[in-house]
Amino acid sequence: MVDSPNAIDDARFRAGSLLVIVAPSGAGKTSLVRALITQRPSIQLSISFTTRQPRPGEVDGVDYFFVSHDEFERRRAAGEFLESAEVHGNLYATSKAWLDSQMSAGNDVLLEIDYQGAEQVKAIFPQAVGIFIAPPSLQVLRERLIKRAQDSQAVIARRLHAASQEMAQVPNFEYVIINQDFASALGQLLHVVDASSLRYFNQRARFPELFASWEAVRAS
Ligand code: 5GP
């Protein structure tokens, strides 16, 4: 609810949605996000900073900004990150300046981050839309990680252990998509994204004069 006239300047009254997507690795998040962006190309995907080594095929500045531990810590100390977290032994963070510029421009923004980061983002932007993508079972997750063949056995074991902890975070999310079948999961993700963009404060930012005319009636 709007409880003061100044609330109109509140960050919530921006036309874009801040979408935060969290999933254990292997839940199919990356493919779903790629397909989502193909269908909704106006969504801006944040490129995170990480200390992780690039996987084969990953490109610096496209998949991540791959930085050394020292550079990461220097940027973190300089307050450049909106959120940061250690995930599977590596550091990850979202650029604050990038997010500010996208949100100020009214763009839809998508953060593909872990649950610790999501919690930090929610504390700063309560209007963020938390979407959790879950695998249908831990067994399916194990099979997907093995099939992906991008990580060593030890890394897979660590990721599976982390997945059960990550699943425990599900109550903190507004939306939960169980990725049993890619096409249905994508359909559900599109519904969530489209519905989120029609929330009161997004619409108010898009149509300020219309909303002002209604508010004038209410105030008279
Ligand atoms: P991966 O190394 O497999 O690309 O990602 C590992 C985990 O780190 C995933 O859960 C991913 O969502 C998360 N992650 C990626 N970027 C960020 C970020 O900027 N912040 C946080 N907190 N987690 C991130």
Image: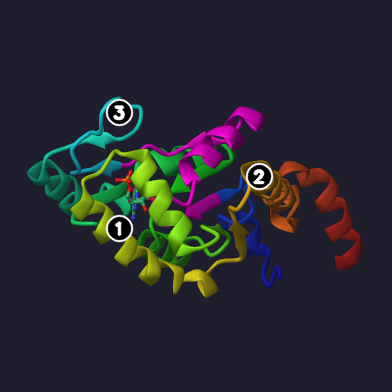
Distance (Cα) linking label 2 and label 3: 32 Å
Q: Can you identify the residue that label 1 sits on? A: 159
> Could you tell me how far apart the alpha carbons at marks 1 and 2 are, in whole angstroms?
36 Å
Q: Quadrant of residue 105?
A: top right
Residue 47 is one of the magenta-drawn residues = yes
**Residue beneath label 3, please?**
58
Nearer-the-camera pick, 24 or 174: 24
Looking at marks 1 and 2 on the same chain, the residue that comes earlier in the sequence is marked by 2
Work out which quarter of the rendered image holds the C terminus and state it. bottom right
Residue for point 18% across, 38% down: 53
Give the residues in magenta: 19-48
Residue 209 seen anywhere in this rendered image of the structure: yes
First of labels 1, 3 by sequence position: 3
As drawn, the label of residue 15 is 2
Residue 23 in sight here = no
Residue 204 placement, left or right of 177: right
The amino acid on which the numbered mark 2 sits, given as a three-letter code, is: Ala
The residue drawn where x is 70% and y is 68% is: 2
